[in-house]
Image (cartoon, rainbow, N blue to C red):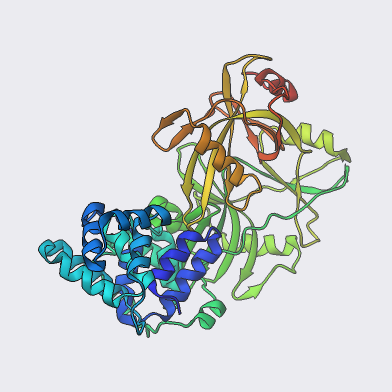
Amino acid sequence: MLSFSKLIQEYKEESDSSQKRYLLTSFLSRCPLEELNNALSFLSGKKEKAILGEKELEGFVSEYLDQPLWMIRSSIEEVGDLSEAISLLTGNPSPIVEIQIGVILEKANQLINLKENAREVLFSIWKTFPIAEKNFFHKLLLGKQNIKIHETLLIEIVADLFDLETGILFEKFRDSKINWKTISILQILSSWFPNRKLERLDEVSISKRIDPSLPKKWHSPSLFLKNQILKGTHFLLFPNGISTQAILHSSGLFLWKKNGFLYENECPSLFREFSSVKENAHILGWLEKNKGGEDIFVYYDILEYKGEDLTFKSIKERRKILDSIFVSDLPSIRAMEWEMVSEALDSQEFQKRFLKEYRNVYLFHPEENEFLEFKTPEQTVRAVLLYGRKAMSNEGSTFWELSFGVPSKNGGDVFQTLARISIDSKHSLFLEIDSFFKENTIEKKGPIRGVPTIWKAELSFHKILPSKRHKIGFLLEDVKIRRKVSSEEPLDSLDSLLNLRDIKM
């Protein structure tokens, strides 16, 4: 099992979000139970101030090793990191013993409260701590051992550890405004779930557990690949909004948008209306705003009902079940209307008639059991990188949010922001873009970095949709970086994009 110090080191070096989560879950499922609070407290994050300065630390290690300062500093320069260099210089103890996080934090607090005892504390640590724990402790002393795991991920891991519903924990942590630095996780869980037997699961049990509050994986239907749409084909037009799953279970109602959990206080009327449904169900829908700006849930499919998998039933049968669930007139819940092609159409004509104002269209035959997604042909535009922001996702993975633009006129030097694209560390261009910002940043506004307009790319997208929220009057749907292009290649202009679909600004 990894020590806590090794866990932090490997977590920081790991770029894959699923592997990061595995490291955390593995450690927290196996560490001594009395260490759980200390570990969660540290992982919840807080920028700690330095306890000692670098020169003070250098002076103490010079005395401990009985070596001149110039020799210590030469070693630090060679290693390139003060914390690591001092750890290597003082070496491993014999025998090597495991040092728990509670002991490390206790030693740090001793220095905070009684700084005059720094020499005694440090000498004791250098004699007894393994190299990894020394390195961790040195960074802690210098205010450089900062890590913050997003609360969402910590809650999800706690749910896994104690076999609890993630959705219920989200609501309870939000309502209680818990401070991870001061709580006993077992005490707080026992107060929330007095009738549950709270035992920590092992890794194997965690991997097998089923959380009834979680959504299914977000999969789009298969693509419609034919050129001709037959007469009598049905279709659904999805308005502006966001894909949402409603999970009705004996333990509660859980609404998940594609971009995260929906809390009850965000749309109380919707939760109130769903409470009239007494059976377990898993429903697919779309969350949109009505004219009053309130959220409404538009349902179109059901995956499970009363514990039965409905995916092999026909769409017509599934719709009949849905309509039987929502029999009363509910202002915040309604059915998505079925449309039908009254005559055979080719894909281009179908696109012209129905897709100008809708982002998603599903084609289907009611007697069959699958929807097919209709997508417009891919289009491309050559644009230039303008700005970027490096950040970390809730799962702990690093990503760049990039802003691309095009000149307002052909050959112009005034650029309009055209699209924002996020790429994570797995993207083939991530390292190149990361290096480009490090070497070429010319402007900083908070976390935003501006760069010279020299890094060009061909972007792909499916549709141009009118949008009052965007300064240029439209947005590109499903925009991605298709490839990098040479700096000599000409850029497309805003005018050329407007001509693609005759959008008037």
Which of the pair 159/165 is nearer the observer? 159
Q: Quadrant of residue 151?
A: bottom left
Frontmost residue, 263 versus 26: 26
Could you tell me which residue is drawn at 39 percent across and 79 percent down?
31
Residue at image coords 30%, 56%: 46
Q: State left or right for residue 281 relative to residue 237.
A: left
Of the pair 438 and 205, the residue shown nearer to us: 438
Q: In which quadrant of the rendered image does the C terminus lie?
A: top right
Q: Is residue 484 left or right of residue 121?
A: right
Q: Residue at x 87, y 45 (%)?
A: 231
Q: Residue at x 42, y 55 (%)?
A: 78
Residue 47 x %, y %: 29, 53
Question: In the picture provided, is 77 more to the left or to the right than 70?
Answer: right
Query: Can you tell which quarter of the image residue 229 is in?
Result: top right
- Give coordinates of residue 415: x percent, y percent: 58, 20
Q: Is residue 422 above or below residue 126?
A: above
Residue 180 is situated, as x and y percent measured from the top left of the image, at: 29, 64
| Callout count | 0
Q: Does the rendering let one see residue 388?
A: no
Q: Does any portion of residue 271 appear in the rendered image? A: yes
Q: Is residue 402 left or right of residue 72?
A: right
Q: Quadrant of the N terminus?
A: bottom left
Q: Position of residue 453 (x, y in %)?
A: 58, 25
Question: Vertically, is 409 above or below 51?
Answer: above
Residue toward you, 2 or 58: 58
